[in-house]
Image (spheres, rainbow, N blue to C red):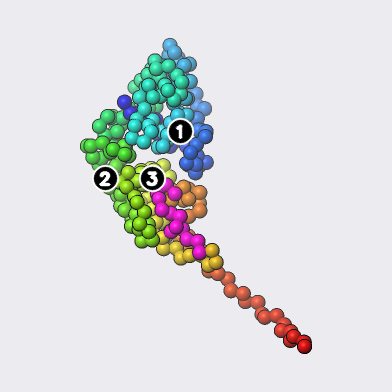
């Protein structure tokens, strides 16, 4: 059964982790609140808390952080046991208690990979206009996307069109689905809106070559993952072409001219 840690971005990410693609660490809240108290008071609560921490560590290494899966394959109890080394019983007890009693883990439906208590949310096409979100009733074969928004594919199609203006790379539907996922992560995890994503794609591909080096971001931004990484690192941004300084001309007066003596 598919599992996802609830509100991963709010509890287990910070400004530093959002800039890193492959984490080697994870921020774990140190709050000892009601949920922690209830968990450790269970019969095998100490083991379950240790298992919970190990599951969080595992989720931090997944392709979509917080979602216990590899590609389109969602981890079951046996998979998790192989990866973190805890017993099947402890893992099963932890998943059941954390999902049913604490609401720390979301149990996804097998058909759509949506939370069992999912309610359609909204996304922003531009900075102001909300869009109704509805997911298909069939599973997404590559993405297993929890919120499938058609406007995400508009950004993907725009990047594909701009990339093909310069070359004809072989891009499969599976790659496009991964680009859709990166767009969703930019919206949900990074706080971007779709209008800015489209604007930045165009700005990168409209950037003229730099004098001298010939460098242009159009040769670098050829996938959504690269664009997201460079954007979070601050190397690209909206309006960067307007902010670029034109080459400075040498306005110093000419120096003295010396005649060559024979």
Instruction: Classify mark 1: helix, strand or loop.
Output: loop
| CA separation in Å, label 3 and label 2 | 20 Å
Q: Position of residue 3 (x, y in %)?
A: 35, 28
Residue at left offset 43%, top offset 45%: 190
* Upstream in sequence: badge 1 or badge 3: 1
Per the image, the residue denoted by label 3 is 182
| CA separation in Å, label 1 and label 3 | 16 Å
Is label 1 or label 2 in front? 1
Per the image, the residue denoted by label 1 is 60
Question: Where residue 202 is drawn, which disc sits there?
Answer: none
Q: Position of residue 27 (x, y in %)?
A: 51, 33
Mark 3 Cα-neighbour bin, 10 Å: few <14, some 14–19, many ≥20: many
Instruction: Classify mark 2: helix, strand or loop.
Output: strand
Contact? badges 1 and 2 (CB < 8 Å): no
Contact? badges 1 and 3 (CB < 8 Å): no
Per the rendered image, the range of residues in magenta is 214-226
Residue at left offset 36%, top offset 44%: 178
Residue at left offset 31%, top offset 39%: 142
Question: Where residue 132 is drawn, which disc sits there?
Answer: 2
Q: Nearer the viewer, residue 115 or 132?
A: 115
- Count of labels in the image: 3
Q: Is residue 236 left or right of residue 258?
A: left
Q: Position of residue 9 (x, y in %)?
A: 43, 37
Residue 250 on the magenta span: no
* Upstream in sequence: badge 3 or badge 2: 2
Q: Nearer the viewer, residue 183 or 70?
A: 70
Choose top left, top right, bottom left or bottom right for residue 51.
top left
Instruction: Classify mark 3: helix, strand or loop.
Output: helix
Would you say residue 245 is visible in this rendering? no
């Amino acid at each position: 059964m598919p599992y996802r840690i609830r509100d991963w971005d709010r509890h287990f990410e910070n400004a530093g982790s959002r800039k890193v693609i492959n984490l080697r660490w994870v921020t774990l809240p140190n709050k000892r609140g009601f949920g922690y108290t209830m968990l450790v008071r269970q019969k095998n609560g100490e083991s379950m808390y240790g298992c919970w921490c190990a599951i969080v560590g595992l989720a931090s290494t997944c392709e979509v952080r917080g979602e216990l899966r590899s590609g389109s394959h969602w981890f079951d109890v046996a998979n998790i046991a192989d990866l973190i080394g805890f017993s099947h019983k402890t893992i099963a007890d932890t998943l059941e208690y954390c999902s049913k009693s604490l609401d720390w883990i979301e149990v996804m439906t097998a058909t759509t990979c949506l939370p069992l208590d999912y309610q359609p949310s909204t996304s922003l096409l531009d900075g102001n206009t909300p869009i109704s979100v509805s997911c298909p009733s069939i599973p997404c074969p590559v993405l297993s996307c929890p919120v499938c928004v058609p406007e995400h594919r508009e950004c993907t199609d725009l990047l594909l069109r701009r990339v093909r203006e310069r070359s004809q790379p072989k891009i499969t539907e599976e790659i496009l689905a991964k680009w859709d996922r990166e767009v969703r992560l930019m919206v949900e995890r990074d706080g971007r809106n779709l209008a800015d994503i489209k604007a930045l794609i165009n700005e990168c591909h409209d950037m003229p070559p730099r004098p001298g080096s010939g460098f242009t971001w159009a040769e670098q931004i050829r996938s959504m993952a690269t664009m997201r990484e460079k954007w979070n690192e601050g190397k690209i941004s909206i309006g960067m072409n307007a902010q670029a300084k034109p080459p400075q001309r040498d306005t110093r007066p000419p120096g003295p001219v010396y005649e060559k003596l024979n």
